[in-house]
């Protein structure tokens, strides 16, 4: 029995190869670049723009992999540098349930503000404390806390928020960054807490990181026996964004068992092919900004007892750099074909 299978294809920041050829039956004439995404027909030939379901009821998505190999053909000729191709499962037009595109959007971190109004007058010598409660610890949400104490030295909220910001930012275990508005010797201080971008332990995140992408979720409270009116509010909710490289990497990692045969991410040594997700700067452009095309479809399978056929859900996800001109080449082929399927899907436009 099949569960939902997600297969991931990741395109690089490249233009379409002018003489594109997969050459399935003639490897010597193959011409496809690493990270190039193409749409194929039912015979795994390159599908031309404008083709419909009447011409090919099944399509495939293919990606040129970094790996190459060599062969000696039946004529004894050695052929080198043949690029390996990653293929999707068959995508049958009559079994496609959803077709959509999602443009890149950046992630945003959670922001909590502690606003001290004009009625708030710190009492000199009184103990004030701020407790930050982290709720993103999945095992025990809310059980990880940090508390910061400060005895007021002046009667101004401006001095209070400056002191608390310094305490929080000096804590090496803090998972938030503190900023403030207000000046020393003045009232109406506002303390602003922003979740750190993980990993927050000083280690640079990369495609080879063990941990999956997550964000800091937290609450904050202000305690004292000597304060007037103040408000604590979440001013920005965290959003993970769409098409950021960390999430693409996680999607790629989760799909490796289905696509690349990698099932071990626990016992060392962990042997995996190089990740195709890119971060950093590529060709002068900041990498990690991907547009996304999602195709949800079903596989027609025979049940284990051979009594009847049923459909099992599958997802084919295509990530391509926002600045890559091959994005439009792929859409020029996919959109007309998807429009010709029984569900007559609307065209995807990512520009």
Image (cartoon, helix red, strand yellow):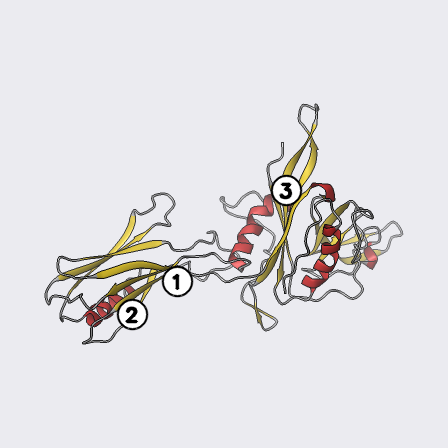
Label 2 or label 1, whichever lies nearer to me, is 2
Dot 1 alpha-carbon crowd within 10 angstroms: few under 14, some 14 to 19, many 20 or more: few
The picture quadrant where one finds residue 199 is: bottom left
The residue sitting at 73% across, 44% down in the picture is 342
For marks 2 and 1 on the same chain, the one whose residue lies earlier in the sequence:
2
Label 3 or label 1, whichever lies nearer to me, is 3
Label 2 – label 3 distance at C-alpha: 48 Å
Residue 314: which numbered mark, if any?
3
Q: Mark 3: which secondary structure?
A: strand
Q: Mark 2: which secondary structure?
A: strand
Residue placed most toward the observer, 44 or 202: 44
Residue 180: which numbered mark, if any?
2
Residue 228 image offset from top left, x and y in percent:
16, 62
In the image, residue 50 above or below residue 137? below
Farthest residue toward the right? 75
For marks 3 and 1 on the same chain, the one whose residue lies earlier in the sequence:
1
Q: Is residue 169 left or right of residue 27?
A: left
The residue sitting at 65% across, 59% down in the picture is 11
């Amino acid at each position: 029995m099949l569960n939902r299978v997600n297969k991931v294809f990741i395109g690089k920041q490249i233009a379409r190869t002018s003489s594109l050829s997969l050459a399935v039956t003639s490897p010597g004439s193959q011409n496809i670049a690493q990270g190039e995404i193409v749409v194929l027909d039912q015979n795994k030939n390159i599908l031309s723009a404008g083709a419909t379901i009447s011409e090919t009821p099944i399509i495939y998505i293919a990606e040129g992999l970094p790996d190459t190999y060599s062969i000696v053909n039946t004529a004894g000729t050695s052929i080198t540098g043949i690029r390996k191709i990653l293929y999707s499962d068959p995508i049958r037009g009559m079994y496609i349930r959803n077709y959509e595109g999602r443009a890149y959007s950046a992630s945003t971190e959670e922001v909590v503000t502690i606003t001290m109004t004009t009625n708030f007058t710190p009492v000199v010598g009184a103990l004030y404390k701020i407790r930050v409660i982290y709720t993103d610890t999945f095992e025990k949400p809310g059980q990880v806390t940090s508390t910061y104490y400060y005895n007021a030295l002046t009667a101004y909220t401006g001095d209070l928020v400056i002191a608390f910001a310094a305490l929080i930012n000096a804590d090496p275990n803090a998972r938030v960054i503190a900023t403030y508005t207000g000046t020393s010797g003045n009232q109406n201080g506002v303390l602003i807490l922003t979740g750190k971008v993980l990993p927050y332990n000083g280690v640079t995140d990369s495609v080879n990181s063990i941990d999956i992408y997550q964000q800091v979720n937290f609450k904050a409270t202000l305690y004292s026996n000597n304060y007037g009116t103040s408000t604590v509010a979440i001013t920005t909710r965290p959003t993970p964004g769409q098409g950021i490289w960390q999430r693409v990497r996680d999607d790629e990692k989760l799909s490796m068992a289905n696509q690349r045969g990698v099932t071990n991410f626990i016992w060392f040594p962990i042997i995996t092919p190089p990740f195709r997700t890119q971060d950093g700067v590529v060709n002068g452009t900041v990498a990690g900004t991907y547009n996304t095309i999602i195709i949800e479809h079903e596989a027609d399978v025979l049940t284990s007892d051979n009594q009847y056929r049923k459909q099992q859900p599958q997802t084919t996800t295509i990530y391509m750099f926002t600045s890559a001109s091959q994005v439009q080449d792929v859409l020029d082929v996919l959109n007309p074909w998807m429009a010709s399927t029984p569900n007559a899907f609307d065209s995807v436009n990512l520009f």
